Image (spheres, helix red, strand yellow):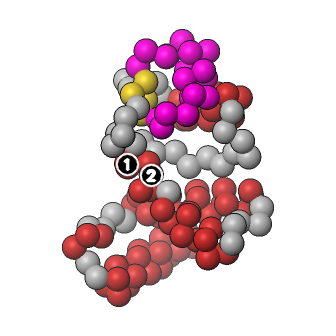
């Protein structure tokens, strides 16, 4: 499960808020994969879950790769202007992107963009119905 929640800071308080929110929404996981940021360790220790945290060089590649569209758009915009805009983009992108998975490495750019546009149009059609 990947979660997209935007916070202004990456300290223990923000990590604790993120972990509580995602555990409430998705239940308690067997293991938690994070990067090596120490605030996650402190937050997990406060929740009593410090022993089931995994971190390593390649373990969080899935999370890093899921954030690439945010980084790409952020670079194009020279940063998001407001946190609310980033959160809105992240939640919409995550909900649409997860329902229409594509084998990105097997497609060229034009085919991928057409597939994503068709998926977005279908998603909007479902929302309007």
Q: Position of residue 10 (x, y in %)?
A: 66, 39
Q: Which residues are magenta?
A: 34-52
Give residue 61's mark.
Answer: 1
Q: Are marks 1 and 2 in contact (CB under 8 Å)?
A: yes
Residue underneath mark 2: 64
Helix or strand or loop: what does disc 2 sit on?
A: helix
How many numbered discs, if any? 2
Task: State whether residue 108 is above or below residue 74.
Answer: below
Asked if one can make out residue 91 in the rendered structure from this viewpoint, the answer is yes
Crowd rating for badge 2 (residues with CA inside 10 Å; few <14, some 14–19, many 20+): few
Residue 107 location, quadrant:
bottom left
Q: Nearer the viewer, residue 114 or 25?
A: 114
Q: Residue at x 35, y 87 (%)?
A: 110
In the drawing, does residue 5 fall left or right of residue 60? right
In the picture, residue 106 is in which quadrant? bottom left
Q: Which residue shows up at 74% across the image and 58% down it?
A: 84
Mark 1 to mark 2: distance in Å?
5 Å
């Amino acid at each position: 499960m990947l979660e997209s929640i935007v916070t202004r800071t990456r300290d223990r308080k923000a990590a604790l808020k993120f972990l509580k929110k995602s555990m409430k929404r998705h239940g308690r996981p067997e293991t938690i994969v994070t990067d090596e940021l120490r605030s996650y360790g402190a937050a997990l220790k406060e929740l009593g879950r410090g022993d089931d945290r995994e971190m390593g060089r390649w373990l969080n590649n899935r999370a890093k790769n899921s954030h690439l569209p945010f980084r790409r758009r952020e670079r194009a915009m020279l940063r998001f202007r407001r946190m609310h805009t980033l959160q809105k983009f992240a939640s919409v992108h995550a909900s649409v992107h997860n329902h229409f998975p594509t084998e990105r490495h097997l497609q060229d750019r034009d085919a991928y963009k057409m597939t994503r546009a068709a998926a977005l149009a279908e998603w909007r059609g479902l929302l309007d119905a």
